[in-house]
Amino acid sequence: MKPEPMQHASALPNTQSPLVKWLDQYGNGATIVACVAMIGGAIWYSYTRTSSARSESAWAQYSQARTAEDFGNIADVFSNTEVGTWARLGEGERLVDSGISLMFTDREAALGELKKADEAFGKVLGNMSGPEVARERAAWGLAKSTEAQSDGDTAKSIEGYAALLNQFPKSIYKAAAEERIESLKSPEAKEFYAWFHKQSPKPADLKKPKDGLPEGHPPIDSLPDNKPDGEKTKSEDQTKSSEVESPVVAKLKAEIEVDWKKMPLQDAVKSIAEKCEIEIDLDGEALKASGFTKDMEQNLTLGKVTGLAAIDAILQKSEKERPGRGMVLVIRDEEKKALITTAEFAKKNEQTPFEFSKPADADPPKLEAPKQDTPKSEPAKDEKPKSDDKPTESKDKDAPAESK
């Protein structure tokens, strides 16, 4: 008789595998650990993908940035990142370039740009974990900004370049920094920056727009106004007086003695400048282009005239010698001096030649009546001339008497 299956099972030894025993003992804990690991992995994977996408977006924005404001916005959004550091450097470099350029035309705006540049460079240098190349360029930019703002004491500017060399001994800017240090030690550099610091250039007033006017329409300023004649005269007088009030023109109206015999042009101009106490420059390049020289002889005997009249005589002579290419006078009130150049170069450099006032045309000479060989008989005292024979005042002045 065959044994039952359960009899065979009971005959086996009652043993468990080590894995089963481990699962019985640690199964719950292992399950928890596995779940945590899976959740952590999912979080890490999600963060990695998000961070990568964010980094790609940041670099894409960086590659499209053009202005200091563009770079500054990127640096603010992606701070404490590599792209944020490079963006902050880009902001500073564009600000320092703009500031140095504005130092010659708009001092107030320039100083504002340079101050912002210093702040941007300081943030890059303060991030010690940032790229070394970025910090090196920031040190160079900060040194340039410091030099541009020098007031004549170049010690601080020298320290800026020295700091660059100390932090980055093998810098690509080493030769340039050493050259700037040597140059800033010279008395000429100190004298220049002391003078340059005192200058305060301001932008010129904006011209009135002509948008919307049809082609050929006169400027708005030239249109007639509806002011009474009295007010018009008053405003015209004010305009004329404001034109005369040019400080350079006022000085050139000083009286001088002109009796020049073979006097070189530059000496004649120097004589006018000294007597009028004003600086007058001669544009040698412009003169040469029109066939003039600074040594060309001036033979003028004008007696006592104003410096302005003497210059006018020189310019008229040049125009006769070179029609259309003669010399002109340019008034530079902002620089408190005058310039003698040529019409061609004045137009090329967008300079406005001074317009000399032309004397009013003299009245035409009056014609005298021809003398008669035989005297006219005088009319009787009691004889009255006819009303038709009475000549008008204009006829007596302008027309000669008819001979009878």
Image (cartoon, grey):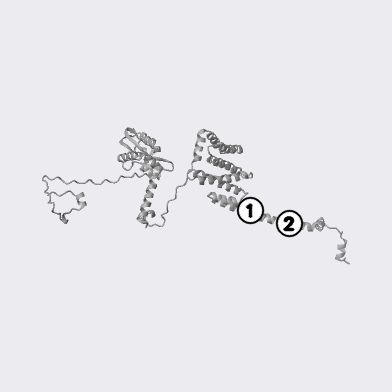
Report the residue at 37% width, 51% height from top.
236
Residue 125: quarter of image? top right
The type of residue carrying mark 1 is: Ser
Residue 11, image x, y percentages:
88, 61
Q: Secondary structure at mark 2?
A: helix
Q: Tell me how far mark 1 sits from mark 2, CA to CA.
A: 22 Å
- Residue beneath label 2, please? 36
Query: Label 2 sits on what residue type?
Result: Val
* Residue 170 seen: no
Specify few, some or many for label 1: CA neighbours under 10 Å numbering under 14, 14-19, or 20 or more.
few
User: Can you give x and y, in whole percent of width and height, for residue 231 in the image?
Assistant: 37, 54
The N terminus sits in image quarter: bottom right
Residue 192 in the image, given as x and y percentages of width and height: 50, 37
Q: Is residue 226 left or right of residue 175?
A: left
Closer-to-camera residue (276/380): 380
Task: Work out which residue is located at the far right of the displayed protein and give it.
Answer: 1
Depth order, front residue of 56/369: 369
Q: Is residue 138 visible?
A: yes
Q: Is residue 352 above or below residue 13?
A: above
> Which residue is disc 1 drawn over?
51
